[in-house]
Amino acid sequence: MTGELANYRDYLGHYRATLERKCDGLSPAQLATRSVPPSSLSLLGMVRHLARVEHFWFQCALVEVDQDRIYDDGDAGFAEVEPTEEAVAAAWASWREQVAIADAWLDATGDDDLGRVVTFRQGTDSASVRDILVHMVEEYARHCGHADLLRECIDGVTGE
């Protein structure tokens, strides 16, 4: 696959896979560890946050579905993270569901759609599809950098 959309998808896929690698092999307690006090940032919170981001941009903004935001905890998904197997499974299930929905939307989209402008937040904001996809890549890139630092604090694993 070639073209501008394929490029965005490649980057997005890379960063999604990086997030999974940064969390691989950690216990629920490690995933829920807030490694940079006083921040509420944790790897598990990041999984929840990125599920929330995928949900907002792909469903609420691009598909224009009027629904409540997921993980609406006042801290963008980072708050109230529980160090349990159930919480970890729920976070990953939510993230994977949102990624699948986003990928289905992307499968039905082409390069010609990238300039289309969508309106969201009850008509108060607008952006092109291109701008939203660039934002998604930026969002993952920033948080994967955070994930690298969090992982290093937890068990010393670094780099990619």
Image (cartoon, grey):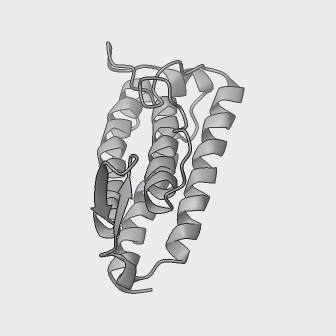
Question: Of 120 and 103, which appears nearest the observer?
Answer: 120
Left or right side of 112 for 44: right
Residue depicted at x 32% and y 79%: 4
Left or right side of 120 for 105: right
Question: Of 123 and 132, which appears nearest the observer?
Answer: 123
| Image: 73 above or below 110 | above
| Image: 81 above or below 113 | above
Quadrant placement of the N terminus: bottom left
Question: Of 38 and 4, which appears nearest the observer?
Answer: 4
Question: Of 110 and 158, which appears nearest the observer?
Answer: 110
| Image: 69 above or below 29 | below
Residue 149 percent across, percent down from the top left: 32, 33
Residue 17 percent across, percent down from the top left: 49, 55
Q: Residue furthest right?
A: 86
Residue depicted at x 54% and y 49%: 66
Residue 11 percent across, percent down from the top left: 37, 65
Residue depicted at x 33% and y 48%: 139
Left or right side of 25 for 16: left
Q: Residue furthest front?
A: 123
Q: Is residue 47 visible?
A: yes
Residue depicted at x 45% and y 61%: 62
Q: Is residue 160 visible?
A: no
Snapshot quadrant of residue 108: bottom right
